[in-house]
Amino acid sequence: MNLGLDDAERAFQIDVREFIDAHWPEGAREVGGAMAHPPGRRSVAEQHWYDALCARGWSVPNWPVAHGGTGWTPTQHYIWDRETTRAECPVMSAFGARMLAPVIYAWGSTAQQAKFLPPIREARVQWCQGYSEPGAGSDLASLRTRAVRDGDHYVVNGAKTWTTEAHVADWMFCLVRTNTTTERRQQGISFLLIDMASPGIEVHPILLLGDQHSVNSVTLTDVRVPVANLIGEENHGWTYAKGLLTHERTGIAGIATSQVRLGKLKQMAACEQDGALAEDAVFQRKLQEVEIELMALEMTELRTLATVQEGGAPGPESSILKIKGTELRQRIADLQIEALGYYGLPYPDDLLLGNEGPVGPDGALDSLRRMLYGRAASILGGSNEIQKNIIAKAVLGF
Amino acid sequence: MNLGLDDAERAFQIDVREFIDAHWPEGAREVGGAMAHPPGRRSVAEQHWYDALCARGWSVPNWPVAHGGTGWTPTQHYIWDRETTRAECPVMSAFGARMLAPVIYAWGSTAQQAKFLPPIREARVQWCQGYSEPGAGSDLASLRTRAVRDGDHYVVNGAKTWTTEAHVADWMFCLVRTNTTTERRQQGISFLLIDMASPGIEVHPILLLGDQHSVNSVTLTDVRVPVANLIGEENHGWTYAKGLLTHERTGIAGIATSQVRLGKLKQMAACEQDGALAEDAVFQRKLQEVEIELMALEMTELRTLATVQEGGAPGPESSILKIKGTELRQRIADLQIEALGYYGLPYPDDLLLGNEGPVGPDGALDSLRRMLYGRAASILGGSNEIQKNIIAKAVLGF
Amino acid sequence: MDFSFSDEQSMLKDSVERFIQNDYGFEQRQKVAALDAGFSAENWKTFAELGWLGVPFAEADGGFGGGAVDTMLLAEQFGKGLVVEPYVPTVLLAGGFLKVAGSAEQKHKYLTGIIDGSVQGAFAFAEPQGRFNFADLTTTAEAAGDGYTLNGYKAVVINGPAADLLVISARTSGGQRDTEGVSLFLVDASAEGISRRDYPTVDALRASEITLENVKLTADALIGELGGGLPIIDEVVDGAILAIGAEAVGSMEVLYKDTVEYCKTREQFGQPIGKFQVLQHRMVDMFMEYEQAKSLMYMAAMRLDEGYGDEAAKAVSAFKVQVGKSGRFVGQNAVQLHGGMGMTEELNIGHYFKRLTMIDTMFGNVDHHLKRFGSL
Amino acid sequence: MDFSFSDEQSMLKDSVERFIQNDYGFEQRQKVAALDAGFSAENWKTFAELGWLGVPFAEADGGFGGGAVDTMLLAEQFGKGLVVEPYVPTVLLAGGFLKVAGSAEQKHKYLTGIIDGSVQGAFAFAEPQGRFNFADLTTTAEAAGDGYTLNGYKAVVINGPAADLLVISARTSGGQRDTEGVSLFLVDASAEGISRRDYPTVDALRASEITLENVKLTADALIGELGGGLPIIDEVVDGAILAIGAEAVGSMEVLYKDTVEYCKTREQFGQPIGKFQVLQHRMVDMFMEYEQAKSLMYMAAMRLDEGYGDEAAKAVSAFKVQVGKSGRFVGQNAVQLHGGMGMTEELNIGHYFKRLTMIDTMFGNVDHHLKRFGSL
């Protein structure tokens, strides 16, 4: 048992740092991570970063080596995540690389793997996730979007909602109902890949608190999808989606991001003009409490990763990461607002009055947006209440 | 709307203070209240206090005037409760005066009222409550103690548990099952008054954390109870018991007691030898938080009392008083232990090694006992989880 | 002790309640908030006609002669409707300074306009370095001839864009955080040397950054004693805290009740989500937080009506602490229990949440008022 | 990075686990705790035979050569069994001072006895006025001839009644709370001038108040440098904190698992109470608290094994904070969910709760270690 890096790991860390310095220079860094505003179209700097990743073979480290992954040890993954987060490197959209890809390499046909994996690995194609439906929320299995077979196509009709990045996505992976007469609601669901350019797809923005447009509703009217785009077997989509949800839970912990934000908050409190926060035992205590909980969660994640290395996919324990990770992110965001004092009030957002630029200290508006939009963290991707149900059932045996 | 006392109320307050000074002198005061150790046999000073109360007609202020109550306004009750709690006056056992008596004056026959109420009012007879049964906990309606009619007696067989003060009680009011074939479990239950001297009753102590013996289990074997001791109608006991449970919830808030204990804790923190706690912003903050919550709860209680004055019995809102009141008492007890530092460890209790007297500052052992025994406050009398169910149903309409 | 309202108070409450129900539904509110001005001049006229703008002022000054309880009743209803009209800055702050410390001439000059709705006011007190300390001032007023010259910078002045009359705090003597040496001035918002940067706030109010450059004031601009402004600020702001706290209580009532309704109707996993015990208990907690805040609201109002002093200030701080905590809990959980819908700009829930979050900051957050409570 | 145990560590863990399961059931534990001595001499002999008493000591000194991870594994199992035998005071405190700062002669003189089980130890550091500050000392050691004379009073000395060897902190120079001037002495518990008042603690340990009146010490009683005791105390106590924290983690595991089992079987309102979602989620919270505490336990152990310094001290304080919070939550809720049964002396639950509560106090509570964490 030890936490230190061995020589090889230390060499790897240096390698990563050099790579970052070369391809993601200091300028224009901004904390990424799961809850930052998802990317619209990319900047030149971002595109360069992705190109460099692909060239180096580091664009999809988590994938199996056969499909272009790196085969890193958990420690290497940990080093990679920490270093890139600290440097605020761009984060590839999770939908393709972290959520869909595992389904394709586990259950996709060879042809599908050949067609869909390379563009994701090379960050050339953006995906979105067509799971939630109006009125369904966390209860995915109640979905009603229908896909009816017509020759070598499915004809899809229905509506999806809370579809992040749908407005910039090239493709959507989508759960649809292919059989309406099953006993259990989880049966009769299929997993389809849909080209967003297909006729019959409409995307409407949903404005969320603190967001500047990342979420959408999507309607599908007589959308024709080639049968070749069905993953695995018809009516077995629920199985594939379930495996995927576990992956979603690990990605969402965002510990390194929280560490970066907490670090900035501590710095801000220390640099405050009259030092009121730096000398405020009560405020400092809150920072210390968050820091300790983050340390604990980081260790919990490392323990989970160590288990993964031995046994494969992360178990239901990963729900802890989701619950605690989102709680901590929300608390840090709240503390940021506290630290801002009256400059937590201004919101010169183009949604309201027209944007003349920031008011108050640097980043105040971003902090506010993050605090507001951050409330979604404990709701989306399976609310924290649902996560607790999962732990109660799968870990405690209820 | 005003919080001040008018002239009559101020005169009453002076009256009460003089009465207390005359009959409960400073010496040997100890905070009473619902969670203190219930009285065993009384001291001379206590007996004097009760006698004085009876002579003045103040022993059962909450009762209807016709039965010996005082007819006070809510403000007078509030003044009385505050002044007697601050002076740490003995508190009459709630079982007779606050829990049983309302049942008797509401549903008892004239003969029962004449027989049972005066000894309670005069503090001559002690009662205990035979509700809970082994294995039943908060689910009262599942009770299994049977009462079978035999001439002009019931023959009672069964067992009760968590019976506070059974070992010093003269009588027990008891829920028994008189019909086992009903549709709903709440039906077929009767309300019996049982002389604890009856043959067939055995009382066994249950030792609880921090307690020195107040709780018991009671077995009833062929106990003969005159039919004259049945309250109201046979099989309707649940109705009477339910009304009574509401009364239990208001009694249990213990706000004035918490105020006294918080006051002592603040004093202790201020007098501490090296002043560490007095200058500790974090500890002071916790005291301030509790003080504010107590202020809020006191106002909530006053609002409830004002409603009572208009409409009669307190509604399900009184569950707030139980939940918040017990939480606050527990928090104050925890803070007392925090304040004690290492002197929160010694427990020279006669249950363990033999009692050589206290170690550490005055009252340290009592603080420990209170902290431990205080955990029962959120369990007994309908756990706080049950109270929330009650509010969800009765107030929010679920 | 008496918890009942007088007939006048009940009438006032009913009148505001009716207005909110009939004329201030959520859609109407959103339209009003989206106006350039950030509020409706027409509504303001209605407030004046209904006498609400005169509630706290003495009858001799043309007011209604109301006390803290009256303000509380009015503001609680405003909170239910998420009213954006600048009642607090104009009537309770600008008006409040006149009421508490204004000379007969000053009252005569300005109160009529406030009461009839023709004058808007604001209190410019915050500075970027000062956090929640009213005495932490770098803005100065220097004696100049018969009057004063103001120089400095004021941050986040709520209702700055619309205000005709500014009350400005400035240092006339002492060090940057001394309690003595703080003075208050009545300033015409169009005076030379004043420039503004206007913007909306998170909760859809309007505010300004105000730069003061050699603003010339005559001697009669001073309100209260020279250097004795701090106790006046405490008294006036505590009255305003009661009002925004009461707004918060009104908002919490809407949130917990709307959440209960939503959970009763919204189905998931084949049943209304309100069947889930965890959500029920969460709503019970929301209900209890609301009740506790309401209790301290009554306490603060009654203490203020007994006369201003430490007891009243302590009750106000206790109330503000409770409002901060309860508001955060109720607001966050209303969003959480509404799921994705609670996050949308189109539903009312998120807007109440935003308002509650901002009320916690306004005039000092939980930590600030806990410390103040402990020091009184 | 590596989270796996070595073969020796796994063997040690298995051996303690077996002992707890076979020989230290709750009833046996209660019998042992009720003995006059407060623990079983026979068990202590077994500990010695199994080599546990030598775990942290160098092989050269007759020990096992183990590190913090080994102590952690052992203590975690002790916590599952609520072991009352005085491992921490004897092996980790008295033994720890010898290991960290003892001279070759001192080690030679005492370590054999500690390792073979014939010597009991205790660390007398707390004083009534000192709260959690190791440097706050009124006990003094004055130079007297070749040696020292001790005078003072020590509070709540765990294992005081059984200890043969006391390590006593005393001031040899400086003011009452100076960090310099704290010295440590090895003192024979039967020395003239030492008197004790013995008593049990809430968690069934044995402790003493110790009065020191002109206790004469020879020069070789000093351990470490004169006046340089504080850093030694920090290092030794941080090792002990890891152990009691690991005990807490073991206790939490028992509590959350027992509570889950209880809720699955206990019926109320016609169904197992574990069907109630509110209770399920509470148990999930208990589980998460346990996992978080366990994570920081690993971290603290690994940091200590990297060598003592600020990083290690910081990890230990973080762990102690987490243990305090998690322990309180898990303990209180285990009692709550067991209902009345959780309150009884006859069930194990309440005893774990008591132990967890006391562990929070021992060596400084949550507030103390939060502050220490922030200062490192």
Image (tube, coloured by chain):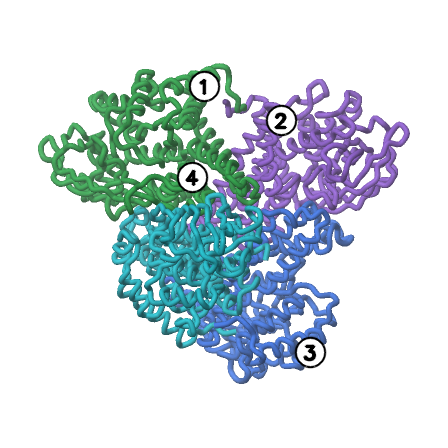
Chain colours: A blue, B green, C purple, D cyan
- Quarter residue C53 falls in: top right
**Disc 2/disc 1 C-alpha distance (Å):** 24 Å
Q: Residues within 10 Å of mark 3 (few under 14, many from 20)?
A: some
User: Which amino acid, mark 4?
Assistant: Pro
Q: Earlier in the sequence, mark 1 or mark 4?
A: 1
> Which SS class for mark 2?
loop
Indicate the secondary structure of the residue bearing disc 4. loop
> In this rendering, do the residues under marks 3 and 2 share a single chain?
no
Disc number placed over residue A52 in the picture, else none: 3
What's the residue type where badge 2 is placed?
Answer: Gly
Residue that numbered label 1 is attached to: B13
* Residue that numbered label 4 is attached to: B361
Relative to D205, say whether B86 is above or below.
Answer: above
Residue C92, above or below A95: above
Q: Residue at x 42, y 39 (%)?
A: B361
Vertical relation: D47 (above or below) B273: below
Q: Chain of mark 1?
A: B
D321 to the left or right of D348:
right
Closer to viewer: mark 1 or mark 4: 4
The CA distance from mark 3 to mark 4 is 69 Å
Q: Mark 2 and mark 3 in contact (Cβ < 8 Å)?
A: no
Q: CA distance from mark 3 to mark 1?
A: 82 Å
